[in-house]
Amino acid sequence: MSSMLASYLTLAAILFCIGLYGVLTKRSAVIVLLSIELMLNAVNLNLIAFSKYGVVPSLKGQVFSLFNIAIAAAEVAVGIAILIALYRNRATTNVDEFNELRN
Amino acid sequence: MIPWLTLLAFSPLVGVLLLSLVPSDRVKLLRCIGIAASLLPLLLAFFIYAYVNVEGQGSSLTERYNWIAIPLNIEAIQPYVQSWAFEIDYHLSIGGLSLPLVVMTAIVTAMAAWASLTIKQRVKSYYIWFLLLEVGMLGVFMARDLFLFFLFFEWTLVPMFFLIGIWGFAKREKAANRFLVYNGLGSALLLVAFLILTVTAGLAVHGDAGASSHLVYSGDLEQMIRQLGDAQSFVNTLPGPASSFNPFYLSEAWRATAFILLLIAFGIKLPIFPFHTWMLRVHVEAPTPVVMLHSGVLLKMGAYGLIQFGLAILPQSFASWSTVLAIIGLVNIVYGALLAYVQKELRLLLAYSSISHMGFVLLGIAAMNDIGLQGAVLQMVSHGFISALFFLLVGCLLERTGTSRIDELGGLANRLPFLSALLLLAGLASLGLPGLSGFMAELLSLLGLYGQLPWAAIAGGLGIILSAVYVLRGVLAITYGPLDMRFAQLKGTQAVEALPAVVLTFAIILIGVLPAVVTIPIEQGIERMIHIIQAGR
Amino acid sequence: MESVYAQYVWAVPIAPLLAFLVLTLMRCVVKGSAAFIGVGSSLIACVLSILILLERLSASTNVYTVNVEWLSFGAVHFELGYELTNLNALMLVIVTVVSTLVNLYAKGYMADDERQTVFFAYIGLFTFSMLGLVISPNLLQLYIFWELVGVCSFLLIGFWYERPAARAAAKKAFIMTRIGDVGLLIAILILFWHMPNHALDFQSIGQVFASVDTMSQYGISAGLATWIASLIFLGAIGKSGQFPLHTWLPDAMEGPTPISALIHAATMVAAGVYLVARTFDIFQLSQTAMLIVASVGGFTAIFAATIAIAQRDMKRILAYSTVSQLGYMMLALGLGAVTAGIFHLFTHAFFKALLFLGAGSVIHAVHTQNIFQINGRGRSMKITAWTFAIGALALSGVPPLSGFWSKDAILSAAWESNKLLFAIGVVAAFLTAFYMSRLFFIVFTRAKRVHTEGTDSPIHESPAVMTIPLVVLAVLAVVAGFVYTPFYSGFETWITGVAASDHTNVIVIIVSTIVALSGIGLGYFIYGPNGVREDRWSNVIKPLYHLVERKYYVDELYKLFAVYPLKVLGKVLDVFDRYIIDGIVRYTASCTVQFGKLFTRIQNGQLQSYGLLSLYGFSALLLLLLLLGKGLW
Amino acid sequence: MNTQLYQPLQGSDLLLMAPELTLVIAVIVMSIVDLLLPRRINRSWIGGMSLTAVLVSLGTVIWTLVDRYQGAIAGHKVGVIELLGGSYRIDDFGLLIKVVLLLGTALVIMISIGHIRESDIQHRGEYYYLLLPAVLGGLVLVSSTDLITLFVGLELLSISSYLLVAIRKRDRRSTEGAYKYIVLGSTASAFILYGMSFLYGMTGTTHLGQIAEALAQNAGQFLPLLYLSLLFLLVGFGFKIAAAPFHAWSPDVYEGAPTPVAAFLSVVSKGAVLALLFRLVFHILFGFQFAGGLGDLSSAGAFINEDLSLILLSIAALSMIVGTTMALRQVKVKRLLALSGVANAGYLLVPLGLNIFQPAAWYSSNFSTFWYYLIAYAFTTIGAFAILAIVCRATEHEELKSFAGLYYKAPWLAVAMTIFVLSLAGIPITAGFFGKLYILLGAVATHALWLAIIMMVTSVISFYVYFGFIRQMFMRDSDSMSHSQTAKAQSFELVSPKGHVGPVSSTRIHVSVASGAVVAFSAVSVIILAIFPNELMTWVNTLLSLANDIYAAS
């Protein structure tokens, strides 16, 4: 059983890292938002894996992941909205160029 | 029961209130109020001085009210105590070393207020900050609670920042910043040291030991001295399991830490040797009435703190470090003197001379006996007056000649005989001429130190020679010699300017002739302190 | 017998003090009558002290002491008061008499000076301090007045403050004497802690140091006594211009001449001698200290005398003579001959004051101090010349003038204890006679050979107000010696309180007389009206002459080994202070700012670098846990 | 237990949740009304309405607190009330924090009323009713004891904040700030979630109390995992409270956001997350404490406590140092205040991080010091932001120079700003000073001397930063003549280079009633809190018990 858990956790960790990598390196603002989704979904994977194969399996993890999905949706919606507003002001979605606020 | 001390400490606020009601363009009225307001604490100080001397020191005035009492959570020690609080008392007292210093502060401040007639800009806010500063200074010398002391101590930074930063000379803001940060650092360390003491020796246990006891963390000076004086019995009354371990015990490491922090904190103010550079800029950049206060009173706060809040609380540490203190004192004396000797700017010369003179205070403290401590206090009071007089005169000089550089001035005795005579007198007082205040102070410091560390006292004698060297160099270069043609038209001293100088001179001579005016009021306080020191050995 | 006047001793110093206060505080009111106040006050003091002296002469009363508590706390009990002994009474008379005469003289000498009031005020303050010093019952009070006379001397040397030379001389005088003062101060520190009950009064000192036994009974070792005595002597060296702290005294001649007479010849500089005499009990217990005193005194006597030979400034010659004579007195004290020392102090006060006032009279008339410029022009001042001659003869030790007797007393004491010091004394006496005759002949008798100035205004005798003191002092210079001759030793008994025998020593009398006369003779031979020119002989021993003329380069040595190092050290420390100490402060400040800038640089507006920073932070915390975390280990 | 989890909301519970419900209703009503009303109708009353809602909510909180206090002194302490199956609780901890949050929000709304212009923010109605869900998120955050509820509250707060930052949607900087905020904020949320997932994995529950108990039993098995999850959580929360080194977003976002929103972020948002972190940390600490017993050093729990304390205090120290030193050369006021917020997050982390369970210390007043500092910080910062809003509006730029000569133009404003500056710098006699004093007392009492010294040294360095305001207000003229020129001009004058030329600029500064009231109220509060803290602190101490109110034993 625990080998199953380990592989799920590893997958989730890889997903999380890919997401983080995307957030930190991708130049497209949309892909950055997408990468965040990836990270959140890695968490969901984790939660569900734990809820099934964890030390103390319980349903709560799945409930938690449901909440996560909903919240992530809201977050992305807001993110995209802000990005659109920003695009209107700047006519670019290049993250590198969002550097007007600096020292 | 009239709260005389509170009235004294906060009497300048009357002036602040009145000043804020007067429109800022009525300069004359503002000045009158400012000066009058500084006379008020002076009168009260004289009254209290007379009262204490007539009634005897047993009746030394004390005021004590509970102020802040923050309850502390007791869940971690629930079974052993009923309540626990952190208390800061509003506790003023004129006993101990305070009285002469309070009177000195009041006099110097009043004279500086008078000398502030040279201030032409923004008179209203000048006097407001000036009086607020006085509150802080008077409070420092009267507070008997560590935290109350700290409040006043730290508060003085703010008015000084304004006074230097707004009314100073060309590089005033830099000077103000440096003053603020450097002294802030000092008081920061002071606070840490105070807290170390509070969380250990500051613990008072009321009620029975055991479940019904009430614990109080407090910064009360008297209690702290009492408890540290008898550490063993103090530890035994603590609540809790009689285990080997007690969180309220002041371990040796903590004691040493607290001592070093205190030494550095007060050392910055004093100032002691490597921590002195901040004051140089203040001496040069601040307006001269403010330097009168700074050099006359604020430096004394460090010395006073070192005795009243250092020596009295941690006598053992001071005793075991007395050689170091003496060496620091000697370094101060010699270093200050040598640097004063080569300065070209009179104000810098005086700044270094302050360092040198404060060295004698350290020597007096290092003596750890009543003679040395009397000497130290006498030196504080005496130097307060002398440096105030010096800077008053420097102010007059600057007003007239626009410079206080030694190499640019000369022969002023011709045009400004009165000013030159007083300058000479201040110089003579500063080099310790008998009959003037500096002599007995230095004599007693050395005398006391000889009883403890003879070699250091003998080395300190060297300082007396050096002080003659640099004082005469500076003063004679300005007053004696041929008169520069540039100064041929200088106007003589006016009576208005002369008054504060005369008062300060009178004080210097009075203390020189009758040093007992300083030593008698503090005799009991010092006796007690010596008792503590001896009990600690 | 009940003392009548002794209880008014306090009034003696008070009179000049009042004069000082009146002259200082009411300067405008009393402007015209400054001299009158000065003379009057010192006259009162003088009369009173003479009465006191007479009273003590007529009946040998006990020591009279009055003390009031001055400063008292814990173990400290400092007292102020006055004490009257025979020695004190004598000193009172010396000081007040000279002071009165100098005041009178100054009325004429300073007549043109607009700062007369200040001058007389200073003299009043000085007289007060000197009298206070004399009647001090304890060492601390003595020290206080010791410093006060020092500062008066400083003020008066620098009286003509516009002159850079006067400024330098005043400063030098103060600092050099201060070096000695610190010695005395340290001696006081030591005594305070080692005397029983921290007593500092002379009576207790006398009791403790009465003998080796009493001293060790109070736990004072012989070594400590030597230290105390040497330190006290250091004070005396400074004040009395002994080698090596003598250099200030000749420079002090920048002050007005009456001051030189009063302070730098008769009274203040003798305070060192007085101090040693007063604390002689301590010296007596230490052979080493006595030897130091005698050697320093003897050396100074001969050392200064040689310098005096080659000087050109009239007052400086007299100043070096003073140094030399003070050396004599120290020599006497070092030999244990207190009476002889005090006696020489007594006679020297009169004839040296006389010489200075005489010199002042000449200078006042010719407006120069260079003897070669005066060059015989003093001859037209008859009274001055005659009185000066008397003074010079007295100083040279020609019998039966006062100097002879006092010098004889010292030489006989030396003869008895140390032949080497006797020889030194004799040589010094010869030199004294020589340089005094040199001075006298050049100033008063030399024919005018060169006219340096185009129009040579006729020289007039000084006014009566200046000559009267000269005459009085001349009389005193003649008669003062008869107080204590080899044939009458009552003076010694009176001073020391121990019955003494006469000390007639014919050899010494003869030797000293011969020496004095031959010195004068040599002087006449070279500098007399028909003498050979000076350069004849000075060329013969040129290097030596230069050495002497430049005062053995002592000033230069001081400059090289004390002043410059101090200045260089100061400059070095100044740089150290500015760039190292303050540099560290500034460096710390700028480091803080730079540290902030480091983080500010990351603040580049790129959100991804912010994220990266957070990731680094995460890794750093992880590392921290791995390294320091206790749970993982 | 499981049956309890799905227990529905009871009628009586509605009353207990009145503060939250008030806000919920207000938001709904306001958004509907805003939607339905025609465009031409002025929306400024919405600000008043939202203020009313917050005040009502605040009133209910205070009313509850008073009730509980009276109960406590009468001897029958009202215990913790658990709702919604233990996932939500009404306790004194939450209530006290809610006071600060609601008070802060109310003041922010008042600033907004005086500050927000139509030209600036097109949707003023939206602006006001977005503030309410944000603070509602904060309220949920501090009351929840379940990871899920907690996360929902956190996201409610965060998402509303993103929107508030972006509210000036035509403004380049506003939207840029918002974008940075949402990207980094969501990443932080992902970190938090990732950490939470491990906590859940190790214990099988999302209830904080149960997590604590489970960890106390088996933490030894999963120690690396536990540490990893704690680190993830700390990074996430550290980001939300802008603690270094996770602070980099805050200057940019504050600069982009409208001034009142910046105030909201620096007080309400930061305060709520800190409070949550407080609860979280103490759950874990307490869990080990109860398992190990008093002063038992042998257990693994004691080590974990120490390590957790080390990490928290390191973050605290780093925040103080970075926040302060970065501010040294900062000339833009909002960025400066953001950095000051970083440093203050560091100070506020200290009571959380102090290891009170080491046997050397019996000190456990962490909460009261935390709370006192938080409220002092809230008043000070909001006051400063209010003045900033007024001043920058008048001078139309946000550099430190905009404060130049303020003393001449508006002396009382300058005096108030001086009070705030002194409080921020921690100089007597202000609440900021006493706040630091109390925190410091705790640090020294728990023998964390190194931290005490860092704290004091950084606060001294901050003197320089904060007194920069004073230099501008009192020592400079408002005309453009720069300091160096002034100094140069004066160094040529030898004789009397004293003082300044006096009031030059006559620009009047307009202070609206609402803003003025905020400034006055904050300034007075800062002083009053300092001089008379006794009553308030007695309240806090009487009400709060660490073991009962913070630790949610199931």
Image (tube, coloured by chain):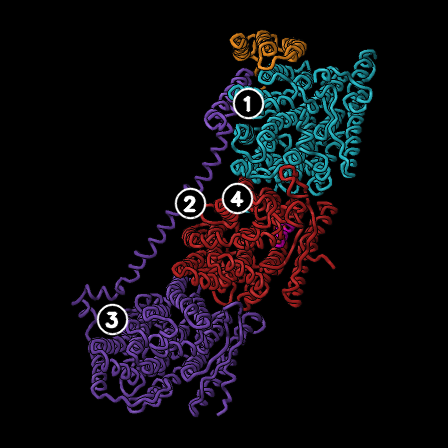
The letter of the cyan chain is D
In the picture, measured across the screen, residue B488 lies left or right of residue D499, that is: left
Pointer 2 chain: C
Task: State the CA–CA distance, disc 4 to disc 3.
Answer: 82 Å
The letter of the orange chain is A
| Residue C421 position by quadrant | bottom left
Element at label 4 = loop
User: Looking at numbered disc 4 in the image, what kind of residue is underneath it?
Assistant: Ser
The letter of the red chain is B
The letter of the purple chain is C
Is residue B140 placed above or below D252 in the rendered structure? below
Q: Position of residue C386 (x, y in %)?
A: 33, 83
- The segment highlighted magenta reads B134-142
Quick one: label 3, few (<14), some, or many (20+) residues within 10 Å?
many
Q: Which residue is mark 3?
A: C306
Task: State the CA–CA distance, disc 2 to disc 4.
Answer: 50 Å
Of circles 2 and 1, the one toward us is: 1
Report the predominant secondary structure element of the magenta stretch: helix
Element at label 2 = helix
Q: How many marks?
A: 4
Element at label 3 = helix
Pointer 3 chain: C
Q: Which residue is mark 2?
A: C577
User: Looking at numbered disc 2 in the image, what kind of residue is underneath it?
Assistant: Asp
Task: State the CA–CA distance, disc 2 to disc 1.
Answer: 58 Å
Task: State the CA–CA distance, disc 2 to disc 3.
Answer: 46 Å
Q: Earlier in the sequence, mark 2 or mark 3?
A: 3
Q: Which residue is mark 4?
A: B244
Quick one: label 1, few (<14), some, or many (20+) residues within 10 Å?
many
Do circles 2 and 4 both sit on a common chain?
A: no
Do circles 4 and 3 both sit on a common chain?
A: no
Q: Are marks 3 and 1 in contact (CB under 8 Å)?
A: no
